[in-house]
Image (spheres, grey):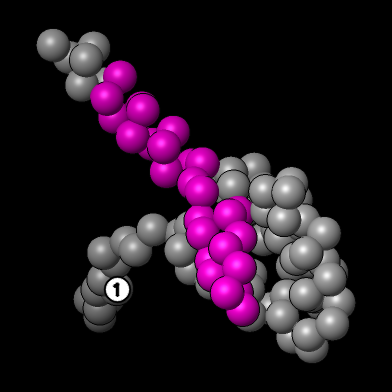
Amino acid sequence: MEKNKETEERTETEDKNKQAIVLCISGIDYTFNVTREEYNGFVNKVGAQKVGPAFNFLTATVETDKRTQLVHLMRNTPGAEMEIVQLVVEEYVPDLDIVVKKRKP
């Protein structure tokens, strides 16, 4: 019984680590297949440069058949990379119930 629970929990975690996120942009559906590795790579590269890592992350995770359309959209729409990446990342990252407790003096 314990092994089944462990397997179930591992599968649930694995499912959260890879997600297909669909955004409808200007009437076209784009599916971003985000993995933990892609997400971590993006977060690690964001620093002083934000647009380049956002562009690379989005083109790496979007479904291949929509990549050319997405690149065209991002190159011809100022700020598109940042707006799109924000939505993809918000959808990928889970909402955690975190409370900061006050320290005792």
Residue 59 on image: x %, y %: 77, 57
State left or right for residue 94 relative to residue 62: left
In this rendered view, identify the residue nearer to me: 30 or 94.
Answer: 30
Q: Is residue 3 left or right of residue 13?
A: left
* Position of residue 100 measured from the top left corner of the image (x, y, whole percent): 29, 73
Span colored in magenta: 7-32
Residue 27: image quadrant is bottom right
- 33 left or right of 15? right
Amino acid type, residue under disc 1 in the picture: Val
Residue 95 figure quarter: bottom left
Q: Residue furthest left?
A: 1
Q: Position of residue 72 (x, y in %)?
A: 84, 71
Question: Can see residue 79?
Answer: yes
Whole-percent x, y for residue 70 in the image = 75, 65
Q: Residue at x 79, y 75 (%)?
A: 74
- The residue that appears at 49% across and 42% down in the rendered structure is 17
Give the position of the C terminus as an image quadrant: bottom left
| Relative to 44, residue 46 above or below | below
Q: Write down the residue under mark 1.
A: 100
